[in-house]
Amino acid sequence: MKNPFTLKLQAGVLLAGELLLLLTSSLWDDLDPNRSWPAWLYIILFAAGGYALAGSRRWLAAYLLVSAAAVVLGAMEESRVLASISTASFAIAFYMLFQAVIGHCFFHAKVAAADRIIGGIAGYILLGFLWTSQSHWATMLNPEAFLNTRTELAANESERLYYCFVTLTGLGYGDIVPTTAVARLLAVLNCLSGVLYLAIFISALMGGLAAKGRK
């Protein structure tokens, strides 16, 4: 099916949604103590961004189904099995988004160079949200898996998002630290994914530009 979006910078839809989530993340805990609405906001904004890139109603329906199942199952905190399935469902949803981003940036011949760069940036930010969603699994196993060293309290959701992005970029301020084996494993994978993504994206982008130059 032909992509219904007529925007020249389709990846900008996803990037705009990601930036909105980042800018409002510090308000999540103050506005809604049960912290359920940010997940639905994730779904709406990411579904719009992914649809702009994939241009397929089938992709949109599958993404909404997987994401909604992840949120509903994640709300059943009394069951670790269902919470684990929820975490896996979130990972599948993010994989679908990455697939849409990579396909748009590197496998569509008529994509503008600026849109490829925007898509690459959106993909990198998407990694931060991916590891934020996976941090829920660590806190499910141990509520104090991530500790705020300033307050000596367990990190809340917005603080874990901040931690995951700081870890992704390799800054590692140390104000929030992983305290369990699972949390430390996620931190290692987070760091590796950030470094590898930048290396692969930059090399692929430069290779594509060089190929166009030779033509």
Image (cartoon, rainbow, N blue to C red):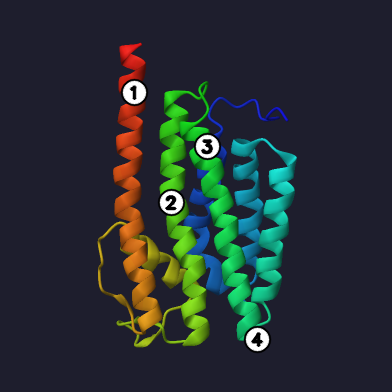
The residue under the point 61% across, 44% down is: 50
Q: Could you tell which of marks 1 and 3 lies nearer the N-terminus?
A: 3
Q: Which residue is mark 2?
A: 125
Q: Which residue is mark 1?
A: 209
Q: Amino acid at mark 2?
A: Ile
Is there any visible trace of residue 194 in the rendered image?
yes
Image quarter (top left, top right, bottom left or bottom right) of the N terminus? top right
Q: Could you tell which of marks 1 and 2 lies nearer the N-terminus?
A: 2
Work out how far the residue at label 4 is from the one at label 1, CA to CA, in angstroms: 50 Å
Indicate the secondary structure of the residue bearing disc 3.
Answer: helix
Q: Amino acid at mark 4?
A: Ser
Work out how far the residue at label 2 is from the one at label 4, CA to CA, in angstroms: 30 Å
The residue under the point 53% across, 27% down is: 108
Rate crowding at label 1 as few (under 14), some (14 to 19) or many (20 or more) other CA atoms within 10 Å. Answer: few
Q: Could you tell which of marks 2 and 4 lies nearer the N-terminus?
A: 4
Q: Give the camera-side residue of 88 and 112.
A: 88
Q: Which residue is mark 3?
A: 103
Q: Amino acid at mark 1?
A: Leu
Work out how far the residue at label 1 is from the one at label 3, CA to CA, in angstroms: 17 Å
Provide residue 160's location: percent of width, then percent of height: 43, 71
Rate crowding at label 3 as few (under 14), some (14 to 19) or many (20 or more) other CA atoms within 10 Å. Answer: some
Work out how far the residue at label 3 is from the one at label 4, CA to CA, in angstroms: 36 Å
Q: Could you say which quadrant of the image residue 201 lies in?
A: top left
Q: Which residue is mark 4?
A: 79
Is there any visible trace of residue 32 in the rendered image?
no
